[in-house]
Amino acid sequence: MRSRRAAAGVVVVCAAVLAACGSSAKTPSASPAPRPTVRRTTTTHAAAGAAATTTTTTTTTGRTKPTTAPPTTAAPAAGTASKSSFLAQANAICSATSSKTKALGAGLPSNPTPADQADALDKGADLIDAGITQMRRLTQPGGDRADLIRFYQRSQQLLVLTHQLADAFRANDQSGVTSIETKANSLDDDLTKAADAYGLTACGSGSQS
């Protein structure tokens, strides 16, 4: 496991919450919370004179947000903001979000159960998702966007992994926890590099102190 580090404002909450949880260094010991259930609804319909078609919809219950389908990784379109103006606003959002995720990790008990860890991961991911949403609603800068787009994409991918990690804790799936952490850590490193390269220091290495 990586050393304890604070989560970036918009970087996956694994860093802050999992460090406090102990991550894969701890073997889940408590009975897991119920896993989300999946309900499939099949609907048959046909237009006049056409053959019937069947549509199957999958609905996840037991958690507020399903994680089977990842969020879009499309970055907001280029806008008219100057890069300096965008960075000032975006870094402020990252700083505020970072404070919230750090508080979440610090609020965990000294010996958290798998359910404690899973709940913290889901709550932290929701906080980060809200921060990303705020950033996406800002007027975006025009040129020089390769690292910014990479940042948005990696952020969304890490949110999906964070929710998957929460599910693994709930299931007492230690091998799943280890596997997902490995993927998340690699993706987190790439995201931090993209954030720093673009100037989003409060979202990257500057948030790790």
Image (spheres, rainbow, N blue to C red):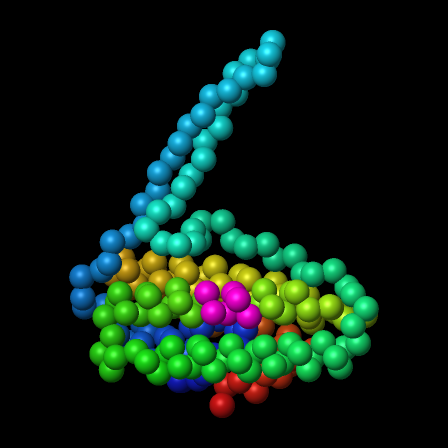
Q: Looking at the image, which residue sits at the far bottom?
A: 209
Q: Looking at the image, which residue sits at the far top?
A: 49
Identified at 68% across, 82% down, the residue is 88
* Left-right relation of 30 to 157: left
Q: Main secondary structure of the magenta part?
A: helix
Residue 107, given in percent of the width and then of the height, sits at: 32, 80
Identified at 69% across, 71% down, the residue is 147
Identified at 22% across, 60% down, the residue is 32
Vertical position of residue 109 compared to residue 71: above or below? below
Of 98 and 23, which appears nearest the observer?
98
Q: Which residues are magenta?
A: 126-131
Image quarter of residue 190: bottom right
Whether the magenta-drawn stretch holds residue 77 is answered as no
Residue 163, given in percent of the width and then of the height, sits at: 41, 60
Identified at 18% across, 66% down, the residue is 30
Quick check: can you spot residue 39? yes
Vertical position of residue 137 compared to residue 67: above or below? below
Quick check: can you spot residue 184? no
* Left-right relation of 52 to 166: right
Residue 142, given in percent of the width and then of the height, sits at: 80, 69
Vertical position of residue 96 compared to residue 12: above or below? below
Position of the N terminus, as image quadrant, is bottom left
Vertical position of residue 22 compared to residue 65: above or below? below
Residue 207, given in percent of the width and then of the height, sits at: 53, 85
Image quarter of residue 63: bottom left
Image quarter of residue 91: bottom right
Whether the magenta-drawn stretch holds residue 128 is answered as yes
Of 100 and 21, which appears nearest the observer?
100
